[in-house]
Amino acid sequence: MNLVFAYGRFAAAVNSLLVVLVLGAGPVHAQNAPVKIAVLGDSLAAGYGVKPEQSFPARLEAALKAQGRNAAVLNHGVSGDTTAGGLDRVDWMLADKPDIVLVELGGNDALRGTDPAVTEKNLSAIVEKLKAAGVTVWLAGMLAPRNLGAEYVTAFDGLYKRIAEKYRVPLYPFIFDGLEQNATFVQADGIHPNPHGAQIIADRLLPFVTQNLDNAAAVHRPARP
């Protein structure tokens, strides 16, 4: 065998491999982009009465990064927002190209005494719209004020589970878990979490988030331009 010829073929093969690796570096790098988790919510997410970095979405992002997870939590909370308002904001939120949306809405519907059937219809429409956009959906539940009566409470409290089962989306049963009936975790209005309360929400939500992030089949990343 001609050693010069053989070496030339070997060098050409190596060069071709290097070209493939270099050209392929772009897509590989893109896969390392952070997973974007948007929180479509009300004042609980917006961080009413606390600094932006003290809101539960900000605390949740910090906790995920502390675990070494490449995730960004986008705060799309609007104080006073209802499920109807959230539905109107879906397209605007999707402009940020989230991979996952945690829907945290319904508390203001209950405070206003909105018919639970209307709340359920709006939340269902939000889930359907997000799924149609190829986004993974998680749902955070809320409980109705007990002074609205047993019939209202039963109808409202059950709607989150019905939606989660219908659309097969993960459900975090109660976003206010750990704060109810404890004045030390809320502001003077008795409703909104203080910085300590926001931290509790993030801490309790974290296992739900990490479990679903670890479920590879649950995270579908939309195609990006």
Image (cartoon, rainbow, N blue to C red):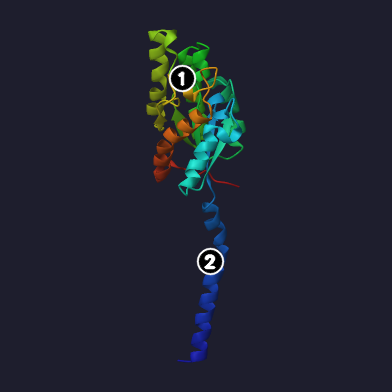
Q: Which residue lies under the disc numbered 2?
A: 21
Please name whichever residue, 120 or 112, is drawn nearer the observer in this view of the structure: 112
Name the residue located 45 percent from the left edge and 28 percent from the top edge.
140
For label 1, the SS is: helix
Residue 101 position (above or below residue 28): above
Inspect the image, locate mark 1, and give the three-letter code of the amino acid beneath it: Glu
Q: Residue furthest bottom?
A: 2
Label 2 Cα crowd, 10 Å radius (few <14 / some 14-19 / many 20+):
few
| Mark 1 Cα-neighbour bin, 10 Å: few <14, some 14–19, many ≥20 | many
On screen, residue 146 versus residue 134, left or right, reads left
Q: Position of residue 71 (x, y in %)?
A: 51, 45
Number of marks in picture: 2
Q: Residue 69, image x and y in percent?
A: 47, 47
Q: Residue at position x 45%, y 29% from top?
A: 139
Quadrant for the N terminus, please.
Answer: bottom left
Q: Is residue 42 something that shows in the picture?
A: no
**Cα–Cα gap, marks 2 and 1:** 50 Å
Query: Which residue is rendered at x = 48% and y = 91% of the image?
Result: 3
Identify the residue under disc 1.
Answer: 120
Whether residue 210 appears in this view of the structure is: yes
The kind of residue tagged 2 is: Leu
In x, y percent, where is residue 15? 55, 75
Query: 208 and 169: which one is in front?
Result: 208
Quarter of the rendering containing residue 157: top left
| In-front residue for pair 94/109 | 109
User: Which residue sits furthest front?
Assistant: 184
61 in relation to 44, above or below? below
Query: How far across and how far down the image is residue 195, in percent?
Result: 53, 30
